Image (tube, rainbow, N blue to C red):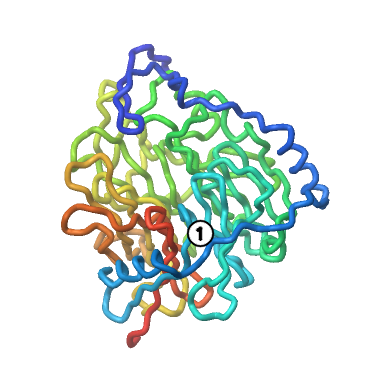
Amino acid sequence: MAQAKTAITIVLGGLLLASTGALPAAAQKPAAEAPAQDATMNKLQDFKSTGARTIPSVPQGGEKAAAIKKTLETIKLPPGFKISLYALVPDARMIAVGPQGVVTFVSTRKTKIYSLTDRGHVGAAEDVREFAPTIEFNNPNGICFSKDGFLFTVEQNRVLNFPAAEFFYENPDVAVSEVVKQGALIPASEESFNHSARVCRVGPDNKLYITIGQPYNVYAPAKYDLYYKFGMGGIIRMDRDGSNREVFAHGIRNSVGMDFAADKTLWFTDNQVDGMGDDQPPGELNHATKPGENFGFPWYGGGHTRTAEYKDQTPPADVVFPVVEEAAHAADLGMMIYTGKMFPKEYQGAIFSAQHGSWNRTVPVGARVMVTKIDAEGKAPDGSKPFAEGWLDEDGEYTGRPVDVEQMRDGSLLVSDDLAGAVYRITYEGKK
């Protein structure tokens, strides 16, 4: 691609900045770990104790739980469905349900991952504690399980693997290995506080898939070749040991949600360009049917809407446009494809996704769980519809911000909320 030198105006964290491609100094971070943490990682990888004896826990119940339960009374669901508080989890983000049904893990965009255990099988976790507290995480937003019980965590610039996480989670020291070493997921020069929340899935091919957002609102053309090489603004995949890394999909601004369908194809959400007005561009629900597809960014800011920065360039001819155009600036994040038996048959194979809610809109939208029913041709003739809503009140105030949706073994759904610091559980009690 031609290396243009024209300055581009970008939106970063709500501020308009002029850029020719270099990140502002405040957005850069050193990649090196402290020597003490290196020593800790070496011990854990060699199955040796660090000497830690306690695991910080999160109290459940109390006034906060009571207030959240009151909020949940206002949430609207289809007939027969019920929502309840599953656990208090500070900064709750992505959810990984253990394949053995023992424990559920919840990530944050900060420095912690939590384990949630429903020991009495009462539909709520009475035991919430930090997972692997001796490890220093940096934005460990991405977490996912393999079917054989390996937990993967994807930080801003590192990927770890925790064998037998459901067995070791009650100890401060856990078995761990480095899939991608610190500083090797993306170039250290491109580390940023913006769009650095990754998500992951282990695919039907047993490879690890990771979304990597690019840090700008719209990046400068001079960045294209570097970002394409590393899969920034795309989805990469690799063997579970980190080998054979490749770019699976590109032309993606900042995806924070994906899942595989029964036909082994990949669906994912994407957050689109800010600063273009209240009602454009749309958010996206995309369908990747083969490796190497281009989903249009940065030529398109969302759907068929062209970006001002690339309006004079001819877009690639092979762009794959979204299956569903979502509400503009609703911030579509975590998603999953329903395979459970608890919900009525009409929800089999449907996509449940979380809309986190607006910041770049005069009238906010989102803060809800959407459902998208997919037909046999891979289309969504009815688009996406609200499934659980009410966290955005009539005064425009958010009482919660859903982040991720995941299915439990019994077919119920868990929904995380990083504003309330909670995880909810949605069950069906009506007639099928």
Quadrant in the picture for the C terminus: bottom left
- Location of residue 198 in the rendering, given as x and y in whole percent from the top left corner: 50, 44
- Residue beneath label 1, please? 95
State the residue lying farthest toward the top: 5
Label 1 packing within 10 angstroms: few (<14), some (14-19), many (20+) = many
Q: Viewer-proximal residue, 277 or 385?
A: 277
Count up the numbered dots. 1
SS type, badge 1: strand
Does residue 263 lie above or below 19 as drawn?
Answer: below
Q: Viewer-proximal residue, 202 or 107?
A: 107
Residue at the image position 48 percent from the left and 77 percent from the top = 123
Going by the image, does 233 lie left or right of 164? left
Quadrant in the picture for the N terminus: top left
Residue at the image position 35 percent from the left and 50 percent from the top = 332
Going by the image, does 424 lie left or right of 264? left
Decide if residue 265 is in sight here: no
Going by the image, does 294 lie left or right of 16? right
